Image (cartoon, helix red, strand yellow):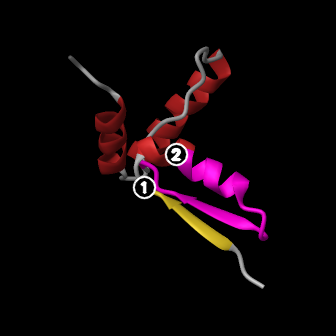
Amino acid sequence: MGAKGNRIEDPGDVRDGLAAALAHKGGPVVVDAVVDPFALALPSHVPFHTAKGFTLSFAKQVWAGKMDTVIKTIEHNVRLA
């Protein structure tokens, strides 16, 4: 027994990929969605404790010598026009 596998690499393919997975009746389905590893998932309203934790996390990364990761995260998420 195995599982059907669907890989989604393009954001435009999400709807069709998930629809195909949900429509499959022959057993389990694994959906492999390729995402941006630096993308931040933030709600529309950020409570203070969340912002505090986010800031503390960035500070810990800097102190641990991972400034390159912090810079990449900022570059991928802050769009200055």
Of 79 and 60, nearer the camera is 79
Residue topped by disc 1: 9
Residue 64, placed above or below residue 4? above
Of 27 and 38, nearer the camera is 27
Residue 33 in picture, x, y percent from top left: 52, 55
Of 39 and 30, nearer the camera is 30
Residue 71, placed above or below residue 23? above
| Residue 68 lies within the magenta run | no
Region in magenta: 16-36
Residue topped by disc 2: 14
Q: Name the secondary structure under disc 2.
A: helix
| Residue 24 lies within the magenta run | yes
Question: Callout 1, which amino acid?
Answer: Glu
Residue at 71%, 54% in the rendered image:
23
Mark linked to residue 22 = none
Residue 29, placed above or below residue 57? below
User: In the rendered view of the protein, which quadrant contains the C terminus?
Assistant: top left
How far is the residue under mark 2 from the one under mark 1?
Answer: 8 Å
Give the mark nearer the N terminus: 2 vs 1.
Answer: 1
Q: Are marks 2 and 1 in contact (CB under 8 Å)?
A: no
